[in-house]
Amino acid sequence: MKLNSHYADVPENQSALAPVDVKSEQLSLQDPRAVLSLLEADQVVAAKRRTHFGRKNLSIATKALLWGLRVYVVAMLVIVLISVYQAIHAAH
Amino acid sequence: MDAPDKNPNLLAGQTAHPTTESAVASAAAPELIGLVTHEDVDRARDRWEVARARWTGRSKKFGGIRLLWLLVGPGVLVFLGENDAPSMLSYSADGSRYGVGFFIPFVVLTFIMGFIVQEMTVRLGTVTHRGHAELIFDRFGKFWGFFAMGDLIFGNFLTLVTEFIGVRAGLGFFGVRPSIAVGGALVIVVAAITTGRYWTWERITLSLAIFNGLFIPAAILARPDWHAVGHAMVTWMPLPSGSRYEILLLILATIGATVTPWMLFFQQSAVVDKGMQPRDINAGRFDTLLGALLASVFAIAAILATVPLFHHGINAADFQAAQFAEALEPLIGHTGAALFALGIFEAGIVAAIAISTSSAYAFGEVMQTGHSLNRPLREAWPFYLTLFGSACAAAALVLIPRFPLEFVVLTVNVIAVLAMPPALAFLLLLVNDPEVMGEHVNGFWANVAGVTVTVLLIIAGLGFGLATVFPRLLGG
């Protein structure tokens, strides 16, 4: 399965290291090639730290939705406080 | 091939894309080979076990079972962690106030909703290898990221307080002093997190989580009418009667016992820390389904365990954890009551571990510090400090004399439901984003299910809001 990958665009003569046979019972994780053979490209901590998914352009509708839900949460928290106050008041 | 020192920063500033390409086959491999960390080695070790289980599984009789055993974890933990102290108390309130009826199939429905939501986090984590907080910050920016984090941290802290309330109340049934109960719980939390290995932490926490099943023998000792249980599952009858406001509040609390924001952040981060890859998605779905199934059975058991209170007309409206166990003792016996109390204690402990871990994951992802249970303490001390610090702060609050803990317990599940729609909006936007998900983007029916869950939560929240502001609307 090949997804859209920057690494896939690099010509073959610039690729990588020889992979290690990960089916071998004698595999040693002291060999960093073995570690890299078992992980996907962006599972490696150093790779993840240096690459980020870019900012998504949000449509006006999406922004309105997010803002609407934010207002909803704030309003509901106020109502929760009212509810708690009513519960205390009823208890006393 | 360019030598690494001619491309010292091959990766910096590059945009991430979903990829299944092996790291050793990537163009950045010559650079990465010198940057492999302890965390990478531990994760590779876990992947090697999974790979071996895959190869040998085809020839061995129980090979497939071993593979599932290796990959099961985040889904079971998230659902059994969500069967926390306030959740089990919500289920207990369902049983004690309304008996066998509507709430039993309703609980099953809430877990179906939970599965729909959590399955998306499995795909997000396995495809992007990034936690939920990190993705929100990357794709939506700091402004929306801090909003999402604010909801999470606020909700998590309140929930953590209730977990330690549960721990205190559960062990209080056995006469254990609050300071000893809470202190002992903190020791267990520390013991679980300082293993330096995600795998070990996961197995320890799973071992504790399975004790959520203590509610099953407690339910059996309550001698439920199984015919009535079967009838309720099919017909949803009888419907709850009485104050409509209280029924609505309990409906909201029951939903909040199953779908909460911290679950999204926790499972996705745990899937990433476990090193799962897109080929593991089906196993992740099985893991999530297994967790939902187990948790729903244990939740129904908690309902059934407290039905005797309903039959004896005992008003459990203001009951806290210890009071449930004490009230049950003459009805289901000391053993049954003790099992119930132990179950509440377990619910509190496991949730305390899972929820404080979710806060630490989110903090580490946002602050770009080490955030893996595969890292030792000295390498990821901010991560562990957040984890342990949040647990300690919550535990300390529980020990303050005359602190109004009942208000926190009353509101925490309701707040969880109310905070869920924005969290689901971010989740749906991410899981429908082809630049993030590649070919694993949401399909039509997954979107229908996800939007339906979101709309139902908003309607439930609005209903609660209207009923609170206009109590006469429900005749209350």
Image: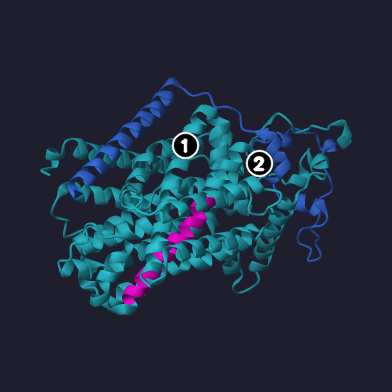
Chain colours: A blue, B cyan
Residues drawn in magenta: B336-357
Place of residue B325 in the rendered image (x, y in percent of width and height, measured from the top left): 30, 69
Q: Nearer the viewer, residue B436 or B320?
A: B320
Instruction: Give the SS element for disc 1.
Output: helix
> Could you tell me which chain the residue with mark 1 belongs to?
B
Q: Residue at x 63, y 57 (%)?
A: B198
Q: Nearer the viewer, residue B298 or B226?
A: B298
In whole angstroms, how far apart are the C-alphas of marks 1 and 2?
Answer: 19 Å
Residue at far top of view: A60
Place of residue B61 in the rendered image (x, y in percent of width and height, measured from the top left): 60, 74
In this view, B223 is above or below B353: below
> Could you tell me which chain the residue with mark 2 belongs to?
B
The 10 Å Cα crowd at callout 1, few under 14, some 14 to 19, many 20 or more, is: few
**In this rendering, position of residue B222 left or right of residue A52:** left
Q: Residue at x 70, y 33 (%)?
A: A6
Q: Nearer the viewer, residue B445 or B197?
A: B197
**In this rendering, position of residue B248 left or right of residue B141:** left
Q: Nearer the viewer, residue B57 or A63?
A: A63
Quarter of image, res B85: bottom left
The rendered magenta stretch, by its main secondary structure, is classed as: helix
Place of residue B259 in the rendered image (x, y in percent of width and height, measured from the top left): 39, 49
Q: Residue at x 42, y 44 (%)?
A: B155
Q: Amino acid at mark 1?
A: Gly
